[in-house]
Image: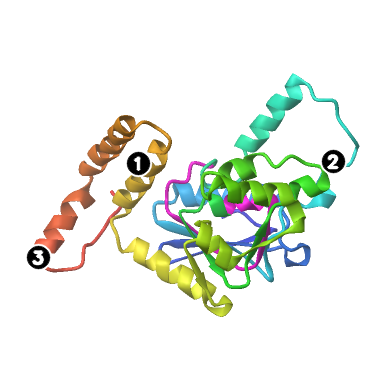
Amino acid sequence: MPEFETIRFEVDARVATITLARPDRLNAMNQRMKEDLRAAWGIVKDDPEIWCAIVTGEGRAFSSGADVESLDSGGFKKPDRWRELAMIETIRALPTPRRMGVWKPVIAAVNGLVNGVTLDLVTEADIPIASDRAQFFDSHVSIGYVSSHEMVNMARRVPLAVCLRMALLGNKERMSAERALEVGLVTEVVPHDRLMERAREIAALVCENAPLAVWGTKMAILRGVGLPIEQAEEIAAGYLEVVEQSEDHGEGPRSFVERRKPAWKAR
């Protein structure tokens, strides 16, 4: 297990919990946190004993976004093609579940303020839930930055007008947890003190299902988004065919007939 400086990583009952842990900086993301998150998501992806993951924050913020003090303050840089390519690669390497190839279910438990780059951890979560104290905003334009991948991802989760309002108002307005629920950014709002309890309840329910079927279903849905329906159905059929070759595929009907709880093996 790697030694983490900026996050806590715990596994219990097949569920990994990743907690952003720089509360003195409102869990702002610096280079070390990026490295810690990459390592953590790598474990979630590769460990067969982990079937689901929860990501949350310590203290009063989920994350305030990028640590502004760690950004390059050397002034304006003339754009060139090499820098453009480097920026594209940087976005691809961001430590988020989708970019890290994590196809196991991810629950985001948004405990407070969330801004900027770490909005990706919410929009890439499969089941995002929020504390009633949560607030969402994107401050990029307020500090002279273009909101790029953050709002591109957001526009796939909420109505376009809602996304544009958040992007263009910057730090001048914050979206409440209740509004986030209304527009589909989160799936549930719970009292703050029950947030992690509820996240673990949801994770436990997910883990009662056949893990390979769950992962295949997630992949089938996400790989088909935006494609013509015929292509999307072909992709889904491919995942179905793969999972049909597993031991768990036979265990489901067998346990139903035998009137017992299924013993999933994730193989």
Q: Whole-percent x and y of residue 134?
A: 62, 67
**Marks 2, 3: nearer the viewer:** 2
Tell which residue pokes out farthest to the right in this image.
75
Q: Which mark is residue 258?
A: 3
Q: Is 195 on the left or on the right of 104, as rendered?
A: right
Q: Whole-percent x and y of residue 173?
A: 72, 59
Q: Is 70 on the left or on the right of 131, as rendered?
A: right
Residue in view at x 21 percent, y 63 percent: 262
Report the label total: 3
SS label for mark 2:
loop
Front-most of residues 93 and 13: 93
Q: Earlier in the sequence, mark 3 or mark 1?
A: 1
SS label for mark 3:
loop
Q: Whole-percent x and y of residue 258?
A: 9, 65
Residue in view at x 63 percent, y 45 percent: 150
**Range shown magenta:** 100-121
Q: Where does label 1 land, which residue?
A: 220
